[in-house]
Each structure stands twice: as C-alpha cells, then as structure tokens.
Image (cartoon, rainbow, N blue to C red):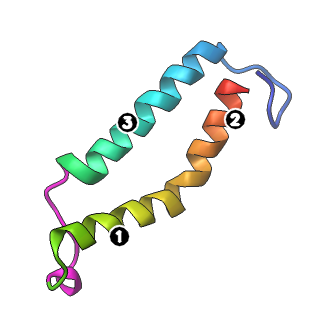
Amino acid sequence: MQYVTENTILNPSVWKMVTVTALLWDISFTMLLKDYEGEAILEELPIVTRRIWMLITFVILMGPLYYGLFRYSFS
C-alpha cells in the first residue's frame, strides 16, 4: 500500500487487522468498559443520553483516523 509518502509500510493484511482491532477496542472502551461517565455537568443527563453524546464525540474525533486507516488497508 502506498499512501502519502509513496512508501509501503507493512503488509495490507496487517493494516486490516490493526483497523478492525483498534476500532473494536475504541468502541468497547468508550461505550462499555469505561466506568467514568463524564463531568459533573453531565450528572443530570440520563445514561442513554450520555452514551449518545459519547458516540457523537467519538465519531467526530476518531472518524477521520479510522477513515484514513480504512482507506489505507482496504483500498
């Protein structure tokens, strides 16, 4: 795979495993394994609303990273 620097870095199958594993880890850590549910300003919100905000924030912040990894490994 060649992307920005025109250099092949590892095998595409390695990047496929990295992409899938990292995405599953981030989703499970963000939504399931992490006991901390936010700052005191979020205490009034129900748990479902907190999880929705966590998912939206995750998509906005981590979406470009996973888009790039997906393009690098599956294109």
Q: Nearer the viewer, residue 17 or 55?
A: 55
Label 2 CA crowd tier, 10 Å (few <14, some 14–19, many 20+):
few
Residue 53: which disc? Answer: 1
Q: Is residue 40 above or below residue 33?
A: below
The residue to which callout 3 is attached is 24
* Quarter of the view holding residue 7: top right
Q: Is residue 37 magenta?
A: yes
User: Mark 1 and mark 3: span between their CA atoms?
Assistant: 18 Å
User: Mark 1 and mark 2: span between their CA atoms?
Assistant: 26 Å
Q: Is residue 74 left or right of residue 46?
A: right
Q: Earlier in the sequence, mark 2 or mark 3?
A: 3
* Quarter of the view holding residue 8: top right
Residue 71: which disc? Answer: 2
Q: Residue at x 35, y 70 (%)?
A: 53
Cβ atoms under marks 1 and 2 closer than 8 Å: no
Which secondary structure, mark 3?
helix
Cβ atoms under marks 1 and 3 closer than 8 Å: no
Q: Nearer the viewer, residue 26 or 50?
A: 50
Magenta-colored span? 34-43
Image quadrant in which the N terminus is located: top right
Q: Which residue type does callout 3 highlight? A: Leu
Cβ atoms under marks 2 and 3 closer than 8 Å: no
Q: Which residue type does callout 2 highlight? A: Arg
Q: Residue at x 27, y 64 (%)?
A: 51
